[in-house]
Image (spheres, helix red, strand yellow):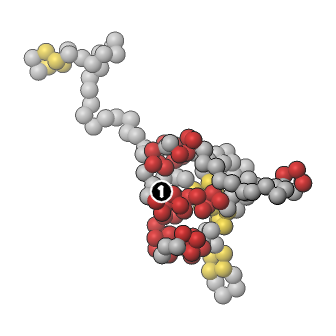
Amino acid sequence: MSNRLKRKGRAKFLMVEGFVFTSKAFRSLSTVERAAYLELKWRYDGFNNGRIVLSCRELAEALNVSKETASRAIRALCAKNFVEPVKQSTFNLKTKTATEWRLAEYKCDVTGELPSKQFMRWPEKNTVSSQGQTVSPEGQPAQKMGGIRA
């Protein structure tokens, strides 16, 4: 990495973009889920999206919650499309590897994939309403006349 890309004595800070903060998906997150998102974002350094390593145990320890609560928080972030697993965790006698995550708001540094920003489309909207309404060719709702739509 070149010297111009390294921080020289500057303090690290965490910025949450306005479009993320005001999204319906972010507003629907619980306090623990928001803290989990911030913990994942803290581990992003601008060059490692898709290689952000965080296990449920590490998250539980960082947030001072149980492993089950940390696991639920990660599942909620995945369900609302804030994060995506790139490489699943493994555990055997020789190696223990935590899951590698990708933040959906940034370009993936592993695959080069563009930001998906799927959380902005949460909740998925139905294209057809459940109570259908007849619309006249002029674009105005049709008037009821004697119980029959014109």
Specify whether residue 111 is in view.
Answer: no
Query: Dot 1 lies on which element?
Result: helix
Residue at 27 percent of width and 37 percent of height: 130
Report the residue marked by disc 1: 79
Q: Position of residue 44 (x, y in %)?
A: 69, 58
**Residue occupying the point 40% across, 40% down:** 125
Screen quadrant of the C terminus: top left
Looking at the image, is 13 positioned above or below residue 62?
above
Graded by Cα atoms within 10 Å as few (under 14), some (14 to 19) or many (20 or more), the crowding at tag 1 reads some
Q: Position of residue 11 (x, y in %)?
A: 75, 57
Q: Of 21 and 55, which appears nearest the observer? A: 21
Does residue 70 show up?
Answer: yes
Where does the image place residue 131, in percent across and percent down from the top left? 25, 34
Please identify the residue farthest to the left as the structure is shown. Answer: 146
Is residue 121 or residue 133 the one in the foreground? 121
In this rendered view, identify the residue nearer to me: 56 or 63: 63
| Callout 1 amino acid | Ala
Looking at the image, which residue is at 24% across and 17% down?
Answer: 142
29 lies above or below 120? below
User: Looking at this rendering, what residue extends furthest in the right direction?
Assistant: 3
